[in-house]
Image: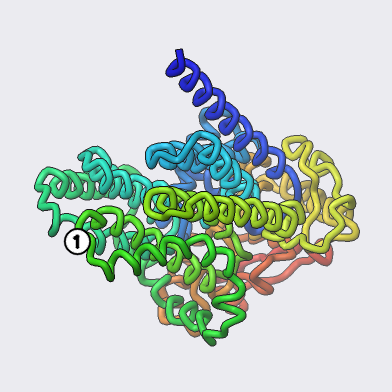
Amino acid sequence: MKLKSNNFKNLYLIISLVLFSVLFNQYYGYIGILPIDSFLIFNSGYDLMNGNYPFKDYWTIKEPFIDLIQAIFFKLFGVSWFSYVFHASVFNCLITIFTFFILKKFELNNNLSFFYSLCVAILTYPTVGTPFSDHHTLILCVISFYFFVLAIKEKKNIYWFSIPILLGFSFMSKQAPTAYVILIISFISLAYFFKIKSISNFFSALSGILVTLIIFFTLLFMAGINFDDFFTQYFLYPKTLGSGRLDWLFPLEFKRVIWRFKLQYLSIVVLVYLSIKYNLLKKNNFFLDNLIILGLILFCFVSIVHQLMTINAIFIYCLIPVFAGFSNVYAKKYLEKQRLISIFLISLTLCSTVYYYFTYIKNRTFMDLRGVNLENSIDGGLIHPKLSKIKWITMFYPENPQEEVTSIKLALKILREDKEKKMLITDYQFISVFLNEYDYSPTRFWYDYHGYPNEENELFDYWNDFVLKKIDKNNINKIYVLMPLHGETKPLENVLKGCFKKEKFSETFYKLILKNC
């Protein structure tokens, strides 16, 4: 009878987490817009669904896996804002449920597992609400790490086999922090295989790597993507950005590197203490737990390093409930005053969740809307019926979103009337989707230097040829530009080199008429 009662409670908690994680993100996915981010995957998912592929048809340095998943969501649920936000909500649900199950696997009680998982649901995807590379990648990295932890704990081949596949999906969402997590897992796995000498586990991991490579090259072949294009865009160009991003780690100031992430450090302090204590005591029966604890500590550090090197607002606070949950697990297992420590970890997680919710999520800080009066928002349906129920407000027109609507509607009208082939450059990438036209854009998003090479970059000639070949191949003689662009002021003008005539329709909308490019 007691077993049946526990099963019912588990089911109740799981259903509650599923509903909350989905509905909470669905709500915030309709509040506020940051054009360069909000519509990026909306457009590329639609393009991929219609046979226009990354690396071949447009330049991209990230997210092909997310584009593929979005294309599937559009295919299943239709091209709508609901199915777009629902994609993010499903991933918010996945990280929430996986967190609940792994904490349960480590014998944390139902209530605590539910609490930490609920905090994960609040802090993870609602930050942005719509599909985004940093969030997808972090979620896939965390789930990969969960599988790794279970592989060490339970020694099951299925976990070892699955880890490379999940990391492959994560890497094809974004290279960092996936590369760091791959290094952590590889390093600790070697220690595990050397000590445990499990041949079946080792070959299961190798099989997972092989399957991942087969999937990857099969998809490249099916899409007709040249490997050189993939390698240049996804490896060589990001490598040229690496040294610049590395500079963002410095100076190593206390306030910036330590104090700013104090809650993250506090969430792993128990793990650090246990690692130091039992390594000094050289406890043999601590080996497997030591590997897991070391992995958690390193994961925390690399997530902070990655945050320091990204141009986006803070988003890694969603890991605090994860680290606090594992700290609770190991405090219960190894420490005498675990009840007091548990109260501290619960308080830390609760306070951080409340703080980050009101500071970052409710205020839409990640959308660059912090300090903006969200009451000024208007219904997105004023732009297009498929944007209905979105509370439309952006950083560009915080006081008067109606002015932005007027600008977009003028562009929609002119583009709809022009039935010829044309290229569209804009951060409002839903336009080509709702016009049911391909925009022939040579890049997924417009952000000089960060998204594609500028004239100082060693790969500028490659980018220059890529753009001109696309223009020539598709017989493009008109390029429409709708401003503002978050990361550009004169898009493609350094490639076209004056072989165009500019025709203005308004302060924010103009056309480049190409001649002898």
Q: Element under label 1?
A: helix
Image quadrant where residue 465 sits: bottom left
Task: Work out which quarter of the rendered image holds the C terminus and state it.
Answer: bottom right
Task: Work out which quarter of the rendered image holds the N terminus and state it.
Answer: top left
The residue drawn where x is 30% and y is 64% is: 278
Pinpoint residue 313: horizontal percent, then vertical percent.
63, 65
Image quadrant where residue 355 sits: bottom right
Assess disc 1: are there few (<14), some (14-19) or many (≥20) residues with their C-alpha within 10 Å of its C-alpha. some
- How many numbered marks are there? 1
The residue drawn where x is 43% and y is 48% is: 332
Please name whichever residue, 434 or 390, is drawn nearer the observer in this view of the structure: 390
* Residue extending furthest toward the front: 336
**Mark 1 residue type:** Ala
Pinpoint residue 146: horizontal percent, then vertical percent.
38, 47
Asked whether residue 53 appears in the rendered view, the answer is no
* Residue extending furthest toward the bottom: 251
Location of residue 298 with respect to 117 vertically, above or below:
below
Please name whichever residue, 445 or 286, is drawn nearer the observer in this view of the structure: 286
Please name whichever residue, 284 or 49, is drawn nearer the observer in this view of the structure: 284
The residue drawn where x is 26% and y is 67% is: 281
Pinpoint residue 117: horizontal percent, then vertical percent.
54, 42
Residue assigned mark 1: 191
Location of residue 112 with respect to 503 vertically, above or below:
above
Pinpoint residue 378: horizontal percent, then vertical percent.
86, 46
* Residue extending furthest toward the top: 1
Asked whether residue 478 appears in the rendered view, the answer is yes
370 on left or right of 284: right
Please name whichever residue, 333 or 302, is drawn nearer the observer in this view of the structure: 333
